[in-house]
Image (cartoon, rainbow, N blue to C red):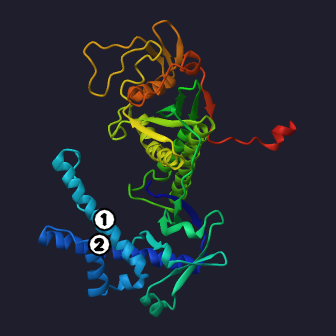
């Protein structure tokens, strides 16, 4: 089984001296990235080929003796140039995809980063020293000559094992700095039954609607998340009113960072709810309904499109898949065409995307956004109907038995909140 890696971001609250060092490291990383891009583009224009990462390391680090390369620790500089080489390699891969017909949108040649900006700097685990709860990050030889600084220091998170850390990234974002710890994750042997399956239908108000073939169902609430995103969009609009589109400020950076942190927290919480449910009920397979490119091609009106695109459902899907792999649960992704229109209880034929038979009609009707009525007049939750139909998409292939899914499962799903709002002590005391 391939190695799996986890990632944890830790906010850095630096003093003035550490902040200056971090800004210096990330600005040098930005400049070195541009040096690597410039050399790669020039070689491409002249020869039609891109230099490999080894060529970049040798040319910029050894032959040119680039000052930005020497200002950083050698491992860190090499990681930055490796990232540049991989971006050009990905560009070639996309061009090949266009030739094969697997990629439709023409890619652009990797371009330069904004001059004077800040870029991510990666320190490998072998270059970092750990002693007495403190991590030592080395600097390059020129930095020591220029500023008398050969290293900077950050505290080690108490919940991580230093021996498992593979790299630490200094990440500048919204005028703040984060330390991103990448560590090896150990696989967990969970007691699950591969015949038990959970189908997941994603949306907005109901972020995840989950139905299992064991006769249970639940919904992960999305209303609060949508409300937070709406607050963010209104706040940005108010701050930028009457100002140019490129306007940015400390206030905008602060509310953007707050919104992004909340979204990341929501992704982790929702994914953990799904995985814990599977472990508690010994469910060994998860089927997630997903249509590739649906965010780009969504057509739900201007307001709903904005809400749908900005909610990080794709990141949630990837996080669920990662946790499934870690716990030995099968993760199956399938297209979800016609799952919301087809009546499960009526046993309607379920078409695949682009292959709906002429004259096909559903036996049931979606009477409201959240309610579906079968041909016999039974009213069920529309999203639950979609979730069980998602399992139907792959049931024949994986031999999933759906006989345990009945009217009760589809009618009354349990609602699960991501955050529980705490009431004021005065309310408890009867003073409100």
In this rendering, the answer to whether 363 lies above or below 260 is above
Give the farthest residue toward the bottom. Answer: 145
User: Between disc 2 and disc 1, whose residue precedes?
Assistant: 2
Circle 2 Cα neighbour tier, 10 Å, few/some/many (<14 / 14–19 / ≥20): many
Q: Secondary structure at mark 2?
A: helix
Q: Residue furthest top?
A: 376
Residue located 26% across and 81% down the image: 59
Q: Position of residue 427 (x, y in %)?
A: 81, 38
Question: Quarter of the image containing the C terminus?
Answer: top right
Q: Is residue 64 visible?
A: no
Q: Please tell me whether mark 1 sits on a helix, a strand or a loop.
A: helix
Q: CA distance from mark 2 to mark 1?
A: 8 Å
- For label 2, the residue is 53
Q: What x and y, as percent, mark residue 5?
A: 49, 59
Residue 86 as seen in the image, left or right of residue 158: left
Residue 304 lies in quadrant: top left
Q: Would you call the spot at circle 1 few (<14 residues within 10 Å), some (14-19), or many (20 or more)?
A: few
Per the rendering, the mark at residue 182 is none
Q: Residue at x 45, y 44 (%)?
A: 310
Q: Nearer the viewer, residue 242 or 158?
A: 158
Q: Report if the CB atoms under discs 2 and 1 are less than 8 Å apart.
A: yes
Camera-nearest residue between 127 and 72: 127
Which residue is tagged 1?
86
Q: Quadrant of residue 114?
A: bottom left
Name the spot of residue 65 as percent of width and height, x first.
Answer: 31, 87
Q: Is residue 361 above or below residue 270?
A: above
**Residue 162 percent across, percent down from the top left:** 58, 70
Q: Nearer the viewer, residue 350 or 28?
A: 350
Viewer can see residue 121: yes
Q: Which residue is painted at 26% across and 87% down in the image?
A: 63
At 33% across and 73% down in the image, what residue appears? Answer: 81
């Amino acid at each position: 089984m391939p190695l799996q890696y986890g990632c944890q971001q830790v906010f850095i609250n630096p003093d003035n001296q550490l902040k200056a060092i971090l800004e210096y490291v990330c600005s040098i990383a930005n400049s070195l990235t541009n040096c690597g891009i410039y050399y790669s583009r020039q070689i491409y224009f002249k020869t039609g080929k891109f230099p490999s990462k080894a060529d970049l390391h040798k040319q910029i680090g050894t032959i040119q003796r680039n000052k930005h390369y020497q200002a950083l620790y050698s491992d860190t500089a090499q990681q930055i140039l490796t990232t540049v080489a991989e971006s050009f390699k990905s560009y070639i891969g996309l061009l090949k995809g266009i030739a094969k017909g697997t990629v439709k949108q023409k890619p652009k040649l990797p371009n330069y980063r904004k001059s004077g900006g800040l870029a991510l700097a990666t320190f490998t685990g072998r270059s970092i020293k750990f002693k007495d709860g403190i991590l030592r990050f080395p600097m390059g030889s020129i930095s020591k000559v220029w500023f008398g600084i050969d290293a900077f220091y950050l505290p080690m998170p108490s919940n991580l094992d230093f021996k498992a850390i593979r790299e630490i990234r200094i990440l500048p974002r919204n005028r703040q700095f984060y330390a991103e710890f990448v560590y090896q994750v150990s696989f967990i042997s969970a007691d699950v039954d591969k015949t038990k399956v959970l189908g997941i239908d994603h949306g907005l108000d109901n972020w995840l609607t989950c139905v299992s073939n064991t006769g249970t169902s639940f919904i992960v609430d999305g209303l609060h998340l949508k409300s937070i995103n709406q607050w963010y969009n209104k706040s940005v609009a108010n701050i930028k009113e009457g100002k140019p589109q490129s306007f940015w400020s400390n206030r905008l950076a602060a509310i953007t960072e707050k919104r992004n942190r909340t979204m990341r927290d929501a992704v982790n919480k929702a994914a953990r709810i799904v995985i814990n449910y599977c472990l508690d009920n010994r469910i060994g397979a998860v089927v997630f309904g997903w249509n590739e490119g649906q965010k780009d091609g969504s057509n739900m009106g201007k307001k709903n499109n904005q809400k749908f695109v900005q909610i990080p459902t794709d990141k949630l899907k990837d996080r669920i898949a990662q946790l499934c792999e870690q716990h030995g649960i099968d993760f199956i992704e399938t297209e979800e065409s016609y799952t919301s229109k087809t009546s499960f209880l009526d046993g309607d034929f379920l078409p695949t995307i682009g292959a709906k038979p002429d004259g096909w009609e559903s036996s049931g009707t979606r009477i409201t956004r959240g309610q579906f009525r079968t041909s016999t007049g039974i009213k069920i939750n529309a999203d639950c109907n979609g979730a069980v139909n998602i399992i139907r998409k792959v049931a024949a292939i994986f031999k999933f038995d759906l006989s345990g899914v009945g009217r009760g499962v589809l009618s009354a799903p349990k609602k699960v909140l991501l955050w529980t709002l705490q009431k004021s002590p005065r309310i408890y005391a009867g003073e409100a």
